Image (cartoon, coloured by chain):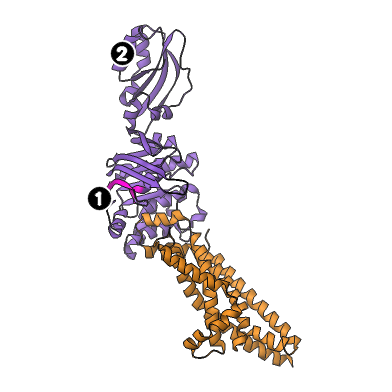
Chain colours: A orange, B purple
Amino acid sequence: MTWSEVLDLLNVGFQETAWMVAVSTLLTAVGGLLVGVLLVLTDKAGMLPAPPVNAVLGLIVNIGRSLPFIILLVAVIPFTRLLVGTTIGTDAAIVPLTIGAIPFFARIVESALREVPPDVVAAATAMGATRRQIVGKVLLREAMPALVAGLTITVIALVGYSAMAGVVGGGGLGDLAIRYGYQRFETEVMIATVVALVVFVQLVQMLGDLLVRRLSHR
Amino acid sequence: MIEISGLRKTYRSKAGDVVAVDGVDLTVGEGEVFGVLGRSGAGKSTLLRCVNMLERPDAGTVSVDGVELTGLRRKRLRLARHTIGMIHQHFALLSSRTVAGNVAFALEVTGVPRAERRTRVAELLDLVGLTERAEAYPAQLSGGQKQRVGIARALAARPKVLLSDEATSALDPETTESILRLLLDLNRRLGLTILLITHEMTVVKRICTSAAVMRDGRFVESGRVADLLRQPGSELARDLFPFEAPESVPGATVVDVTVSGEDADTPIIAELARRFDTDVRILGGTVETLAATRAGRWRLALPGGPEENRDALEYLRTLGARVGVAS
């Protein structure tokens, strides 16, 4: 295999990985924020105390967190078909990726929101802020650096998960490394893929760190 | 302006119930500066947080500016809270917003339109002397500056009442002094009623017109500072004017004398010595200027037993002094 062929493969793989990770990150950010905020609100010391809801939500999150991704990938196949109409390809891989990452990010959101000092929340309450204002203008805003740092960790985890997407024909860099590098003994492809993954993760981390520095005024 | 009656609050925990506030009655008149003094764990923080319903009392009533707060639904309570400002020991500022942004937050919460916010923020920052630091973030400010932001924010909705939760406890003495001066100034210029809790005697000394001493969830004494000082055996008087002096002197009558207000300027010891030709000795004492009044407390030794000094003691009383025979 020539280097230009390798580069072509890499290019396609990179685009597939980037697409899967980008879309699932977006969905995870929305879903994880929602679940994380709900976990904090429904806590018995929270603003909308509802211990049963909190317990059920916590249980679902924990189940999601304890399933190895490769098993989740297979387990949600019926759901994927329902949602995307197919169970193979990049788009199909986005479903298990998102389902796997939401509980992970939700816990990060939960702990980030808990880090906001209680007296800041009390101060807003004492000013007569609504719960919506407290969540939007106090909790989420104050936790923003931690949320961005957490999302960076999630994106990198998603890059890792996406390597398994090959199982459902999802493609991407990880799949490339398995199919060419491992199964066909094309060591160059393996090395090139690993380098590409390292560079990708490095870039994501740097971008994340930069954003956190911009946002943080502590 | 603030009326509290029969207030009780118990915290339940596995280790047993803790009664934080155990039946407190309190009235703070308009324009008054009322200080609740007590050690940590005395229940004063809970008391303060019950005034704006950050803590729901178990029993009793709280009304601020004629509005009974204990029975209010959420929405009405939120509106009522707009008229009650609060400042905090650790400032409780939003770290993600600038000084101006923090003040603007309070205006957003109270629903001031965007166009008005800018001028109002400028006014408020001017009021607390922080105009130059408008674009700084809290992390770049000193403790005193942070508390000024807290005060500006608390005043955003033009409240009639300010609650102060140990506002100067995290500050050094000089900064404390400047924050107290600002509070006193706001009290006088805006007619702001202030209810504060503190464990620092200086705060009571400097700005309070009335005070209460709180212990184990109850007020052990309470009233106007000037009146409390005249009460024999007042803990507040003893703590405000601490001095080391012998409790008894052989062959003499030891008396504690407290004077306040105009009487503080009467030369009572000189008068006493002249009129009764007695070799009165001062064992200890202090004279202080308080927020509302000047006051002094001395321990004197008069030669002879209590019987021989009866007239002299009576005379001291006619001069306006409170006299307690120490031994």
Question: What amino acid is at disc 2?
Answer: Glu
Badge 2 sits on which subunit? B
Q: Is residue B273 above or below residue A75?
A: above
Residue type indicated by callout 1? Val
Query: x, y (%) of residue A121?
Result: 42, 57
The part of the chain drawn in magenta is B50-66
Label 2: how many Cα within 10 Å (few below 14, some 14–19, many 20+): few
Q: Is residue A212 above or below residue B304?
A: below
Q: For numbered disc 2, what is the local secondary structure?
A: helix
Q: Position of residue B207 (x, y in %)?
A: 37, 37
- From the image, tell me which residue sits under label 2: B314
Viewer-closest of B53 and B249: B53
Q: Is residue B317 magenta?
A: no
The percent coordinates of residue B8 (x first, y second) are 34, 44
- Left or right of B291: which side holds A70? right
Q: Are marks 1 and 2 on the same chain?
A: yes
**Callout 1 secondary element:** strand
Indicate the chain on which mark 1 is placed: B
Q: Residue at x 54, y 66 (%)?
A: A214
Image position, residue B37 (x, y; %): 40, 37
Q: Residue furthest left?
A: B66
Is residue B128 in sight in this rendering? no
Q: Are marks 1 and 2 in contact (CB under 8 Å)?
A: no
Identify residue for label 1: B67
Q: Is residue B322 above or below residue A137?
A: above
Q: In the visual, does B67 lie left or right of A110? A: left
Instruction: Give the residue displayed 27% in from the left and 47% down from the top.
Output: B63
The N terminus of chain B, quarter of image: top left
User: Mark 1: few, some, or many residues within 10 Å (few <14, many ≥20)?
Assistant: some
Asked if residue B18 shows in the view, the reply is yes
Q: Quick one: label 1 or label 2, which is nearer the N terminus?
A: 1
Q: Is residue A100 above or below residue B179?
A: below
